Image (cartoon, rainbow, N blue to C red):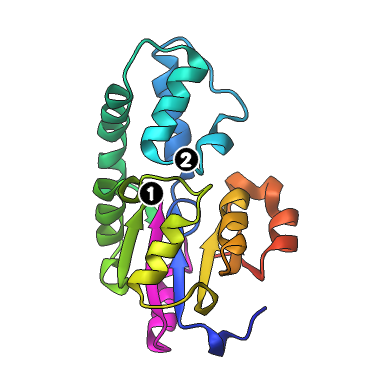
Amino acid sequence: MTERKEIKGAIFDLDGTLLDSLWIWEDIDRRFLAKRGIAVPSDYMKTVSVMEYRQTAEYTIARFGLNETPESLMNEWSEMSVKAYASELKLKPRVKAYLWELRLRGVKLAVATSATPDMCIPALKNNGVFEFFDAIVTTFEIGKGKSSPDVYLAAADRLALEPHECEVYEDNLNALKTAKAAGFVTIGVYDKYSAGEERELRSIADGFMEF
């Protein structure tokens, strides 16, 4: 583990890292595809987890041959998810105390998420941690998913820090690889939905933890 005293910023993924939330996407995907007579393929969630919102919609249309527009898919998903993010989804048990500890040490905090602003901001506010963060950056805003480092680089820039001065916390293996390749200190985070990747997460990340 890199010496923590060197770290000036911490950039957190939202879903599966701060929030116990991946179950809601699984439920939304199941209900969305069931309406169209399609079962959720075993690799679908993992594939779309690092994609920007529109990219996910375009991929879904192409994969299942849907005669729909990306806008119609995004609108339907938003209607299903906004309410859940604003009222149902909770932080993982140790998250709030950990964020508070970092703030007390003077570490700047940011969120880098694939969730849209109308989902991530209400979720953070509902869980009482919105004010903890100095910056919130979404792939929706950046226009690229987490296969690109741009969302992490933008978060570091808004903290006025360089990548090597920031830890990136991620439960997703591919996203963590992206952050590491961009020069960030990486912390793998355990989530039951990515438990199958834990060994590789541990081997690649600079540190590993469970909230």
Q: Residue at x 47, y 64 (%)?
A: 93
Left or right: where 105 falls relative to 172 = left
In the rendered image, residue 112 lying in the magenta stretch gets the answer yes
Amino acid tagged 1: Thr
Picture residue at 53% right of the left edge, 64% below the top: 169
Looking at the picture, tell me which residue is in the foreground, 35 or 163: 163
Residue that badge 2 annotates: 51
Q: With respect to residue 32, does 53 lie above or below?
A: below
Q: Quadrant of residue 129?
A: bottom left
Q: Secondary structure at mark 1?
A: helix
Residue 143 in percent (x, y) is at 36, 45
Residue 26: percent from left, percent from top:
48, 34
As displayed, is residue 206 above or below residue 50? below
Percent across and percent down for residue 117 are: 27, 50
Mark linked to residue 139: 1
For marks 2 and 1 on the same chain, the one whose residue lies earlier in the sequence: 2
Can residue 28 be seen from the camera position used here? no
Within-10-Å neighbours for mark 1: few <14, some 14–19, many 20+: many
Q: Nearer the viewer, residue 156 or 109?
A: 156
Which residue range is magenta in the image? 91-114
Quarter of the figure with residue 158: bottom left
Residue 185 lies, in percent from the top left, at: 59, 72
Disc 2 + disc 1, Cβ < 8 Å? yes
C-alpha span from label 2 to label 1:
8 Å
